[in-house]
Amino acid sequence: MHTKHACRWATTVARSLVLCALPGFAAADAAAAGDTASGATSYEQMARLELYLIPDSHTEIALARSAAPPAISGEATVLILKPQGYETAVHGTNGFTCLVERSWMSPFASPEFWNPKMRGPVCYNPAASKSILVYTLRRTKLVLAGHPKAQMLDEINAAVAHKELPWPDPGAMSFMMSKDGYLGDEAGHWHSHLMFHVPKAAAATWGANLAGSPVVLDEREVPEPETIFMVPVTHWSDGTAAPMM
């Protein structure tokens, strides 16, 4: 999840909050849950806002921290999503930032861009907290302002053209090692992995997606000025064994 992309977004079951949907977020209950009359799943529009929220702040904090080993996440700043946007729930001391990203951090071409079940626990290192986190906050601001996906894409492309979004800081990386994450109906929990954020680059520059290489690149484009190389690891953040590719 920025959510990447076969792998960047989300956890467990979407929970229900008794809130009114914001203007522009109207959707039938069936569509909000992603269910169609045929039994297929469709995420063509944004669901009701409450389906993307986690009612209990302590649950969201714990889920965000599960992205990285406790030695890292235990001292990190933690953000949680509220109807007005992300807010700081815990002030950290080590420069890392942990949060749970939602489906709108996926590539815009993803059929699960509006999947309300997706939860992507991620912990950004200090370099990524200064640069990559800006992408998450910007997309989330547009979503909560009620902008449709096509308009969001246009606005982000314009921001990139006007150099309003930073390039990844040197050394920007993040942890996605939560076994409680849910990165989409197809990916599920996916694999425990690290992500390395670099300015736009081809897969070949990191040997990604080649036979025997542990480096993975989802080649669906995101408009932000980054490429994310993912490297699966052998264990979850709690130290238990994780399935490999």
Image (cartoon, rainbow, N blue to C red):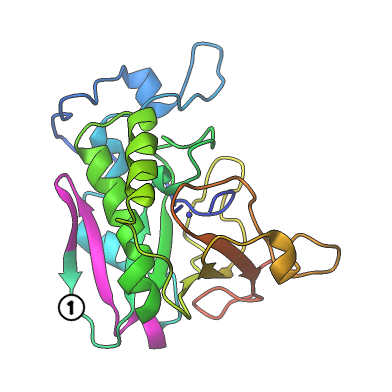
Q: Residue furthest top?
A: 37
Q: Seen in the image, is 51 located left or right of residue 90?
A: right
One can see residue 27 in this view: yes
Quarter of image, res 87: bottom left
Residue 4 in the image: x percent, y percent? 53, 54
- Asked whether, in this view, residue 59 is left or right of residue 9, the answer is left
Residue drawn at 23 percent across, 82 percent down:
92
For residue 204, above or below residue 112: below
Viewer-side residue, 62 vs 145: 145
- Count how many numbered circles sit on residues in the image: 1
Give above or below for 118 relative to 146. Answer: below
Depth check, front residue: 93 or 53: 93
What amino acid type should be assigned to the residue bearing mark 1? His
Q: Is residue 150 magenta?
A: no
Quadrant of the rendering where the C terminus is positioned: bottom right
Decide if residue 86 is on the left or right side of residue 167: left
Where residue 84 appears, x then y in whole percent? 14, 47
Please identify the residue farthest to the front as the structure is shown: 162
Q: Is residue 82 magenta?
A: yes
- Residue name at image x 24 percent, y 64 percent: 79
- Given the current orientation, which residue lies at the most extreme right position? 211
Circle 1 residues within 10 Å: few <14, some 14–19, many ≥20: few
Residue at the image position 37 percent from the left and 31 percent from the top: 149
Span colored in magenta:
71-87
Helix, strand or loop at label 1? It is loop
Asked if one can make out residue 244 in the rendered structure from this viewpoint, the answer is: no
Instruction: Name above or below for residue 104 compared with residue 243.
Output: above
> Residue beneath label 1, please?
91
Q: Position of residue 17 (x, y in %)?
A: 20, 39
